[in-house]
Image: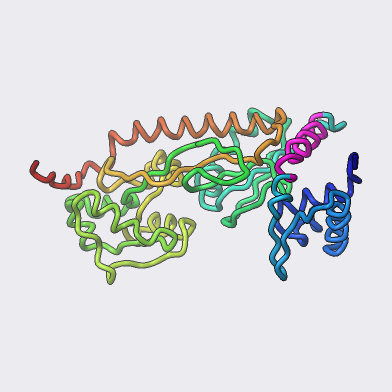
Amino acid sequence: MRGLPPFAPLKAFFAAAETGRFRLAAEMLGLTESAVSHQVRRLEEHLGAALFERHGRSLRLSPAGARYHQAIRPAFLAIRSATEEFSAAPQRRVTLTLPSSIAAFWLMPRLSRWQELHLEIDLQIVATNRLVDLAREQLDLGLRYGGGVWRGYEVLRLMSEQYFPVVAAEFLARHKNVDAVELLGRSRIIANALHPDEWTEWCAAHGLEPPRRQSMIGLSSAEMVVPAILNGIGIGMGRRPIIDPLLESGRLVPLFGARQLENAAYYLVWPEGRQLLRPVKSVIEWLTAEARSSEMTRIDAAKGGAGKKAPRKKERSR
């Protein structure tokens, strides 16, 4: 009977299996890449089986390695959760990563409410548009945009995204006697390079001709699109919940009222199997409440708008 393997090789194997790279495992463990490789070989010798298939720089679990990783993973996750739970110093800081646009336009206006409710918790915001590995970078929560499936993560749907043409209130006031369809056809159109098909999709769904390419100005992200709309450059596609505070304040107005489309959504994520401590749960509860409030505001606002209706798409005869 071989008994328990040495813990250092076991830990090196687990880190390599989780990250898929000896280099990333070395960064996680504070070792050199060669040290991790050496520890994994020690475990392979102990077990009498190859745990990885190596092809140059490529690293892949062997069938035996995949079975072993699946068997020991719950134990490692339990050790990590128990360590966090019995940590001598109670957690005060919670780290949240999210896309820059949702951070700037939706989260920032709400942070004062968070501070009033939870002075005891230090909420650290990491705004970035790259896909962050929460476990490797030791972050607590992520707010992600997409379809809601990310391997290795627990997922909580927070709020849907809706998009529709919007204009600055001042821009609309200057053209108050112009029909919305006519205004769309003769105005400068602001396009978001991150969503190249948004105008084609929205117009097709509402029976309108898409704007001419020569009438468009292309900008790289919502952080540029929203200020351009506010400054009266033209008509842009607004995306809720990013523009919710601007709709609530009246600075932006839907050009066609409630004629909107839903696409992807925003989700809270955290590493699968991680035990959530009370401060992290408080952040999740607060974000969920804010998202619910934002959704209710959207329902109310959908009854208003610029008062100019887009023609409904003609239904085919049956």
Horizontal side of 90 relative to 167 (left or right) equals right
Q: Is residue 1 above or below residue 42?
A: above
Asked if residue 74 shows in the view, the reply is: yes
Where's residue 218, x and y in %? Answer: 39, 67
Where's residue 238, x and y in %? Answer: 38, 50
In the rendered image, residue 70 lying in the magenta stretch gets the answer: yes
- Farthest residue toward the left? 317
Q: Which residues are magenta?
A: 68-85
Q: Residue at x 25, y 62 (%)?
A: 211
Horizontal side of 79 relative to 265 (left or right) equals right
Image quadrant assignment for residue 59: bottom right
Where's residue 274, x and y in %? Answer: 70, 36
In the rendered image, residue 290 lying in the magenta stretch gets the answer: no
Figure quadrant of the N terminus:
top right
Q: Residue at x 56, y 46 (%)?
A: 150
Figure quadrant of the C terminus:
top left
Q: Chief secondary structure of the magenta span? A: helix
Residue nearest the viewer, comparing 76 with 300: 76
Image quadrant assignment for residue 24: bottom right
